[in-house]
Amino acid sequence: MLTTPFSFVSPPLFMAADIRASELAWAKAHPHDALMEKAGAAAAELAGTLASESGEPVLILAGPGNNGGDALVAARHLSTQGFRITVVSRADPARLPADAAHARAAWLQGGGAILADIPSSQRYSLVIDGLFGVGLTRDITGDDARWIAQANDLACPRLALDVPSGLDSDRGRIRGCALRADHTLTFLGLKPGLLTGEGPDHAGELHLDTLGVTPMTRPIAPGIALTQLENRHRLPPRVHNSHKGTYGHIGIIGGSHGMVGACLIAGRAALQQGAGSVTLGTLDDRIVVDYAEPRLMFAVPERLLSMPLSVLAIGPGLGQSPRAHALLETALAFSCPLVLDADALNLLASDPELAKQAAHRPYPTLLTPHPGEAGRLFGVAATDIQANRIEAARNLSLRYRADIALKGAGTVIAHPDGRYAINTSGGPWLAQAGSGDRLTGLVAALLGLGMEPADALEAAVWLHGTSA
């Protein structure tokens, strides 16, 4: 049944290998109930609502695999509904998978035609992209790349089947080029590449059809889409018989000369999220009050590190001076949950001993890097991190035995036990200075309020996204 994946709470994410295993399990258990027929029918149903009323034909691009077979089944259904159809494919009939070959034969036997190229100077009411699905393992070149470029230039809606052709469904990166879809109808389950990296900019509006495959035939994946907050992400109501100490004392260290604003933003966010009290240890000692938020307290950073704190965050506007290095070294030995961001991460990257100390803390540690900072922690370029955001976040989590939020389009939250989540809230308005500092404050506040570290990081990322 066709639905929006965001109507589910924490829907699971499936890698390409999971999807293939699920398809094989279904085919073995239901040899006379092909998933391709279900997928094509679902695609035709959605396509019928998306095609413009211009009366122009629907352009269907069919590739050499099962994705192309889905598109050919959709072509057959749309034709019976009265739509004019133009199918374009150069797939070798002798090399098609069995179900795709059957779909091709059915289309031709019903009077359909298959063209070898997109007709020039033709308008279309809709493009259905069935070139490549989750099985793509190479960069797209040649005629396929040209067809994708032509489809992207057409003045009509574009519907991708399963994933936009050229988008790596596991990693969210582009293989050569990719269709920029207005809608993507994905089958069986959500793929992580649709939600992170280049996925959100190429998938358009997401639709999901599980095709009637029950959870018993689907593998259990460690990843979820963070679509809504679960009960574990929610705090109990504040009781009347309480005081500020009930809700945590948060310490935040940073704010060197010229970068005090980062520390102020983090502190304000922590108070707004409900922290009982917040003390800022700013390296710029000229700042002793925040007139916009006078509830914030200030202390010399070294003195702050001698106070009893519920949570400590270090990094916003910290700088990389010898003093900043010494403060981080002391903070790593602090006996409470620790949030590391910004220059705290850059200092870890430049000092293997600090990194080793961070990885062996006996208390919860949370890191919130952007791709550049994550790259420095690994000694690689940010582009290498972006090439496989999920793997990078999970590897960072293992290396530092920490909960990690790899920020960016589809922030990836990874946990030391192997679980991960991809956040679905937020948008490009978060791409501005101070955004990460606010997230640091939100995470620290939720930790101080008693939420479990993994849940606090997920909840903070989701709440941060909703603010955008």
Image (cartoon, grey):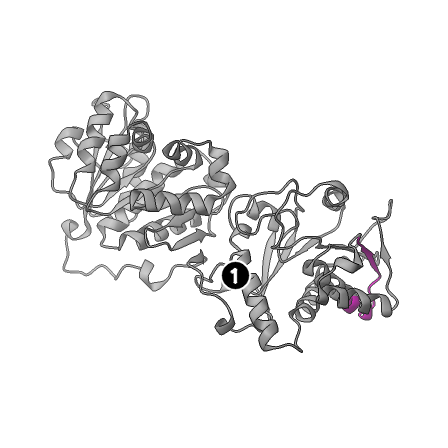
Is 189 situated left or right of 53 in this image?
left
Instruction: Identify which residue is drawn at 81% across, 67% down.
Output: 105
Q: Quadrant of residue 261?
A: top left
Image location of residue 386, percent across then percent down: 49, 39
Front residue of 414 and 370: 414
Image location of residue 76, percent across then percent down: 79, 67
Outermost front residue: 94
Is 118 situated left or right of 332 in this image?
right
Q: Does any portion of residue 104 appear in the rendered image?
A: yes
Please state which amino acid type lies under the numbered disc 1: Asp
**Rendered-image quadrant of the N terminus:** bottom right
**Rendered-image quadrant of the C terminus:** top left
Instruction: Identify which residue is drawn at 15% across, 34% down.
Output: 304
Q: Quadrant of residue 288?
A: top left
Name the residue beneath numbered marker 1.
Answer: 18
Q: Is residue 291 above or below residue 182?
A: above
Element marked by disc 1? helix
Whether residue 14 is in magenta: the answer is no
The part of the chain drawn in magenta is: 76-89
Q: Does any portion of residue 297 appear in the rendered image?
A: no
Image location of residue 134, percent across then percent down: 60, 55
Instruction: Identify which residue is drawn at 33% across, 46% down.
Output: 398
Front residue of 246 and 421: 421
Instruction: Identify which residue is drawn at 75% across, 50% down.
Output: 156
Q: Is residue 95 above or below residue 33?
A: above
Q: How many marks?
A: 1
- Other residues around mark 1 within 10 Å, as few (<14) / some (14–19) / many (≥20): some
Q: Quadrant of residue 184?
A: bottom right
Image location of residue 446, percent across then percent down: 27, 50
Whether residue 87 is in magenta: the answer is yes
